[in-house]
Image (tube, rainbow, N blue to C red):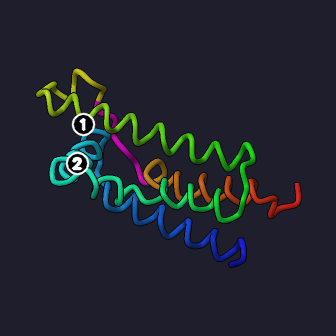
Amino acid sequence: MDILSLFFIFIAIELFETNWQKANSIHGILLNNYKVYRYNIFLFFLLNFSFIYSIFLVIYLQNNSFWMLSIVGIKFLDIAFKLNIMSKINENTPLEDIMPNIRIGLLFRYTNVVIYPITFLIATNYFNL
């Protein structure tokens, strides 16, 4: 499969992941994640499919460059951070004690749809930099 096809699949996965978590604030996103986490932790991992896809890309393309591994690393830290927050919510810690409630605008919500796929193109040397 060519790099451009993998790139567009990456965009589609990021759009899916952003839209199932969609909310107007950080607390809303965390509560959407918590609903899935409480229902089934395996479903939580499956719905964070961009992490799985990133690992697939590293293996499929045999690309373990800094840029590719940084995508996987940031995705891993994102899931680990969310799981930490989910465990605190499970212990009945109020969200206000965990982090402030920041409003999410349209630009901020879809930033990952731009950043990760472009970083993927850089990692695969698509631009011949």
Pinpoint residue 121: horizontal percent, then vertical percent.
Answer: 72, 60
Query: Which residues are drawn in magenta?
Result: 101-106
Mark 2 = which residue?
Answer: 37
**Residue 104 colored in magenta in the image:** yes
Who is closer to the viewer here, 80 or 104? 80
Q: Is residue 54 above or below residue 3?
A: above
Mark 1 = which residue?
Answer: 86
Please identify the residue farthest to the right as the structure is shown: 128
Pinpoint residue 129: horizontal percent, then vertical percent.
Answer: 88, 54
Q: Which label is found at residue 47?
A: none
Q: On the picture, is 72 further left or further right than 83?
A: right
Pinpoint residue 3: horizontal percent, then vertical percent.
Answer: 71, 71
Identity, as a three-letter code, of the amino acid under mark 1 = Met
Of helix, strand and loop, which one carries label 1?
Answer: helix
x 64%, y 42%: residue: 70
x 73%, y 42%: residue: 66
Please identify the residue farthest to the top as the structure is shown: 97
Q: Is residue 67 above or below residue 58?
A: above
* For marks 2 and 1 on the same chain, the one whose residue lies earlier in the sequence: 2
x 75%, y 55%: residue: 122
Q: Main secondary structure of the magenta part?
A: loop
Residue 28 in which image quadrant: top left
Who is closer to the viewer here, 38 or 64? 64
